DNA sequence: AATTTAAATGAAAATATGTTCATGTAAAAA
DNA sequence: TTTTTACATGAACATATTTTCATTTAAATT
C-alpha cells in the first residue's frame, strides 16, 4: 500500500480541484453519506426502501437523491411504481473508505 | 489494488458517518482543497506563502486556515513573525487522491 | 519606544444549503 | 375510471457558509 506521504497530486489542476470540491460538497452530509453507504451494499434500492433503512422522510430523502443524481453521483431507473437508485460514481466509495479508516475519528 | 465494488464499509456507524461528513464538509471547498494540496507538497508553509501561491487574500486565507485547524485537519506553529501551517490529518490526501483519479471529472 | 510586518479576529453582508409542507405526476390496483 | 401507491417538485422558511472590511495582536525591526 502507498503511504499518504507519497500520494501523487500532480495533474490536479485548479479546474479539477473545483470539480473535486463540487463532488465532495455533494456527499459531505450525514444523510447523503448514509445513502451512499446503503447503495454501496445494495446495488439498487427504491426510494421507499431507502427511507425505511435510513429512517428518513420521503420528501427530504427524495430531495437528497435528486441532488446527488443531478451531480452525477447516483443514477436511477423506473421499475413499475418504484424508482430504483444506484451508485454511478463509484469513486466516492474510495473517499468513504479512506475516511472510515481515519484514526482521528 | 482493491476494486471499488469490494470496499468494506462495515464498522461505519451512524456516528462515524457524522464525523466523516464533518471532515468532508471541512475540505469540500476549492480554496481549502487548494491549501491541502499545497501542504501535501510542502510540509509546512507560512500564511503569506500560502496567500501568494494561492493568489488569495490574507484575511480570507486566514479564516480558511483557522477553520481547518479548528477541525483538526491542519496544525500550526509560530516561527518568529510567521505562522507555519502543516497538514495534520494525512488521511485527507487519500480522499484527494481517489477523487483526482475520477474519470467523470 | 515607534514602526513595520505577519497573521488573527469579529461583525456585517452576501450567498448557499437544508428542511418542511403542500401539491403534482405517473404507474398500478381496484 | 377512481383510487391508491411511489416518488418528485416548488415555494417558503430556517440555518449555515463564505466573503469582505475594519480592527487587533504579536513579533521583529528601526
Image (tube, coloured by chain):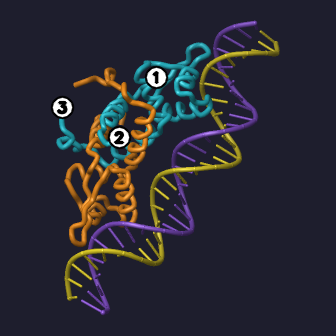
Chain colours: A cyan, B orange, C purple, D yellow
User: Which residue corresponds to the image point at 48% horizontal and 34% vertical from the top-left?
Assistant: A32
User: Which residue corresponds to the image point at 34% horizontal and 55% vertical from the top-left?
Assistant: B69
- SS class of the residue under badge 3? loop
- The percent coordinates of residue B62 (x first, y second) are 36, 63
User: Which residue corresponds to the image point at 37% horizontal and 47% vertical from the top-left?
Assistant: B27
- SS class of the residue under badge 2? loop
| Sequence-wise first label, 1 or 3 | 3
| Label ID, residue A1 | 3
- Look at discs 1 and 3 and give the one toward the viewer: 3
Q: Is residue B79 visible?
A: yes
- SS class of the residue under badge 1? strand
- The percent coordinates of residue D17 (x first, y second) are 47, 52
Residue tagged by mark 1? A86
- The percent coordinates of residue A76 (x first, y second) are 50, 23
Chain letter for the residue marked with disc 1 in the picture: A
Q: Kindly indicate the quadrant of the structure image that contains residue A7.
A: top left
Q: Is residue A72 visible?
A: no
Image position of A31 (left or right of B67) = right
Residue tagged by mark 2? A105
Instruction: Judge whether C20 appears above or below D18 on screen.
Output: above
C-alpha separation, residue under disc 2 versus residue under disc 1: 28 Å
Image position of C28 (left or right of B79) = right
Amino acid at each position: 500500500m502507498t503511504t499518504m506521504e507519497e500520494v501523487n497530486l500532480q495533474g490536479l489542476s485548479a479546474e479539477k480541484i473545483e470539480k473535486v470540491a463540487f463532488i465532495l460538497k455533494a456527499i459531505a452530509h450525514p444523510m447523503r453519506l448514509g445513502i451512499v453507504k446503503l447503495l454501496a451494499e445494495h446495488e439498487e434500492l427504491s426510494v421507499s426502501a431507502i427511507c425505511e433503512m435510513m429512517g428518513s422522510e420521503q420528501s427530504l430523502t427524495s430531495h437528497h437523491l435528486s441532488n446527488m443524481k443531478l451531480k452525477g453521483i447516483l443514477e436511477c431507473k423506473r421499475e413499475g411504481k418504484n424508482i430504483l437508485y444506484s451508485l454511478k460514481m463509484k469513486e466516492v466509495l474510495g473517499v468513504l473508505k479512506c475516511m472510515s479508516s481515519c484514526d482521528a475519528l
